[in-house]
């Protein structure tokens, strides 16, 4: 065996990105965050449920716990309301007597709640590392650079930004500042219809799939009407002519969970379960949406299963925590609900909110210690709220 040695030690310095991924540095402008101060109780503590109940009871009406549909069952158990991100933010705003809003979701959702609630209310995220990979795919600096590209192409004045709710407060503020609106997966078509009344083109942030699916499937555009802007390439990887000819300028972002579903997943489940109804979220790829029987938001998925006849079979293309909860709920009604993909996949950042983090948060608040507060600065909040108000005014 030959052993190779080097005369000089290697001087390898980790890059800033490597340090961030290793959890040894923090990026204050990132959705993710890398730390959660405080001593968490052990996840094996058999008293966690009792501790959560006791802390919540001690806080009483001072606390209002929001649970996103994709959260773990152990967390949903303590939620005062459940729903999608926008519904929960509105629920928080409708509860002005609650001093603390504990948002069991991810960072951008807590930001939205802070924007919509009063200054007296404090929004708390149990784990600061609960971010969103999709929201992270569009930073304020990247979007500002994109707008410069559109300006140089002579089309910024005729382009209206439409940003998905799954975006940071900075991106919502950019949208509001430039005459645009926010959308959810439920009202994306209405938002685009409004935008095309204001201008000739739409810059859709940050989820390319929701933008493409809405434009092509719901509004009758062609795939050729859409171009994909890649923030990691000069000029977005597009020519001036491509930008000028496009109706939809789609940001190169996606959901890591919904992006995993494929046409093979659809074909496989149809072969395994004859007569199955395939129901997917519009964050899925266009070819998956085209192959599905039904397409809709999280709330749409829940309502579709509620209205489904007994004996029906459903393969759902969305986050696994919700699918599993729906499968258990509707089994008693003789409705078969399965996950679309054979490979199990949770949303990793949603799953960062677990019972130890929730217990630590509630016990800290009960002791008078405010932890993990999410607070949007006033200027960002003002423009972000303007974009949200435009959405609320949609017919």
Image (spheres, rainbow, N blue to C red):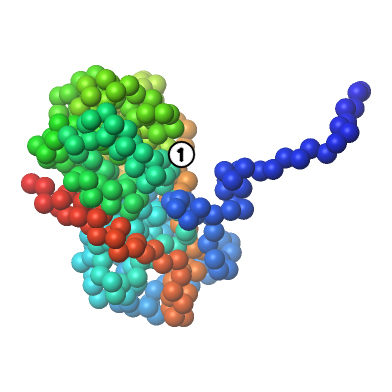
Question: Where's the N terminus, which quadrant?
Answer: top right
Q: Is residue 58 above or below residue 31?
A: below
Q: Is residue 353 above or below residue 322?
A: below
Q: Is residue 206 visible?
A: no
Name the side, left or right, on which 351 lies relative to 162. Answer: right
SS at badge 1: loop
Q: Which residue is at the front of the view, 279 or 34?
A: 34
Q: Residue 291: where, in percent of width, then height?
A: 28, 23
Would you identify the image quadrant in which residue 38 lies? bottom right
Q: Residue 364: where, in percent of width, then height?
A: 47, 74
Q: Residue 86: where, in percent of width, then height?
A: 25, 53
Q: Residue at x 24, y 19 (%)?
A: 224
Q: Residue at x 90, y 27 (%)?
A: 3
Q: Residue at x 50, y 69 (%)?
A: 360
Q: Which residue is at the front of the view, 13 or 152?
A: 152
Q: Residue at x 34, y 62 (%)?
A: 376
Q: Is residue 387 visible?
A: yes
The residue indicated by pointer 1 is 345
Q: Which residue is at the front of the view, 94 or 135?
A: 135
Q: Residue 96: where, in percent of width, then height?
A: 23, 72
């Amino acid at each position: 065996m030959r052993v190779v040695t080097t005369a000089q030690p290697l001087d390898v310095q980790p890059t800033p990105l490597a340090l961030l991924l290793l959890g040894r540095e923090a990026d204050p402008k990132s959705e993710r965050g890398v730390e959660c101060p405080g001593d968490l109780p052990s996840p094996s503590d058999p008293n966690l449920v009792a501790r959560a109940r006791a802390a919540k009871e001690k806080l009483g009406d001072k606390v209002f716990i929001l649970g996103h549909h994709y959260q773990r069952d152990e967390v949903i158990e303590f939620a005062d309301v459940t729903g999608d991100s926008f519904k929960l933010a509105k629920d928080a705003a409708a509860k002005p007597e609650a001093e603390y809003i504990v948002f069991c979701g991810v960072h951008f959702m807590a930001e939205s709640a802070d924007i919509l609630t009063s200054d007296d209310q404090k929004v708390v995220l149990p784990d600061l590392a609960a971010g969103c990979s999709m929201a992270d795919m569009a930073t304020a600096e990247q979007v500002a650079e994109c707008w410069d590209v559109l300006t140089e192409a002579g089309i910024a004045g005729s382009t209206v930004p439409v940003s998905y709710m799954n975006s940071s407060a900075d991106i919502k503020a950019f949208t509001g500042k430039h005459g645009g609106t926010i959308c959810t997966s439920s009202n994306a078509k209405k938002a685009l219809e409004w935008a095309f009344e204001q201008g000739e083109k739409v810059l859709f942030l940050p989820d390319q799939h929701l933008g493409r699916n809405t434009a092509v499937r719901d509004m009758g555009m062609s795939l050729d009407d859409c171009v994909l802007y890649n923030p990691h390439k000069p000029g977005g990887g597009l020519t001036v002519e491509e930008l000028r000819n496009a109706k939809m300028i789609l940001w190169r972002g996606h959901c890591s969970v919904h992006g995993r579903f494929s046409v093979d997943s659809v074909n496989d489940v149809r072969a395994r379960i004859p007569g199955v109804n395939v129901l997917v979220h519009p964050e899925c790829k266009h070819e998956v949406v085209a192959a599905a029987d039904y397409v809709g938001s999280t709330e749409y998925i829940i309502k579709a299963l509620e209205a489904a006849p007994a004996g029906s079979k459903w393969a759902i293309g969305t986050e696994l925590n919700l699918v599993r909860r729906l499968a258990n709920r509707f089994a008693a009604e003789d409705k078969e609900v399965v996950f679309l993909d054979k490979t199990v996949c949770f949303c990793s950042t949603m799953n960062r909110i677990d019972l130890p983090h929730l217990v630590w948060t509630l016990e800290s608040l009960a002791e008078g210690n405010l932890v993990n507060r999410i607070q949007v600065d006033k200027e960002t909040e003002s423009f972000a709220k303007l974009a949200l108000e435009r959405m609320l005014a949609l017919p």
